[in-house]
Amino acid sequence: MTEDRTKPFSTGGFFLVQLAMFIPLLNIILLLVFALSGSTNVNLQNWSRAMLIFVGIGLLITILGAVLGVTVFGAALAALREALGNIEVPNGVTIPQ
């Protein structure tokens, strides 16, 4: 007996899927299974594909932010070190370069 893949996905089903999404690593595995499986409900399949797109966009933004943050922090640290290198500390002690 084949089940209709286009039948609306139930509220309880979405509730259980959302609960499963709270479990790390399992959520990505389930999203991939739901998105790529040919026997999954069409509504759940489309939702999973949308969530995978959101995850991809989030990863790209995170990587871009990390690279930009490290670059800006490194430049600020270098400028601070250069500025402090020109200052004499009392008692003739200088900050090493």
Image: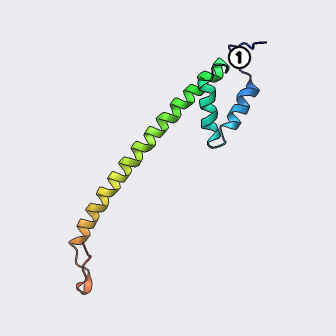
Identified at 47% across, 39% down, the residue is 59
Q: Residue 51 in the image: x percent, y percent?
A: 57, 30
The outermost residue toward the bottom is 91
Q: Secondary structure at mark 1?
A: loop
Q: Nearer the viewer, residue 93 or 25?
A: 25
Quadrant (top left/top right/bottom left/bottom right) for the C terminus: bottom left
Circle 1 residues within 10 Å: few <14, some 14–19, many ≥20? few
Amino acid type, mark 1 = Pro
Identified at 70% across, 37% down, the residue is 19
Identified at 26% across, 80% down, the residue is 89
Q: Nearer the viewer, residue 76 or 45?
A: 45
Q: Is residue 25 above or below residue 46?
A: below
The outermost residue toward the right is 1
Q: How many marks?
A: 1
Q: Nearer the viewer, residue 65 or 29?
A: 29
Residue 6: which quarter of the image? top right
Q: Which residue is mark 1?
A: 8
Identified at 36% across, 47% down, the residue is 68
**In this rendering, would 1 be left or right of 81?**
right
**In this rendering, would 42 be left or right of 73?**
right
Q: Nearer the viewer, residue 35 or 20?
A: 35
Q: Residue 9 in the image: x percent, y percent?
A: 71, 20
Q: Residue 42 in the image: x percent, y percent?
A: 64, 18
Q: Is residue 66 above or below residue 18?
A: below
**In this rendering, would 19 be left or right of 61?**
right
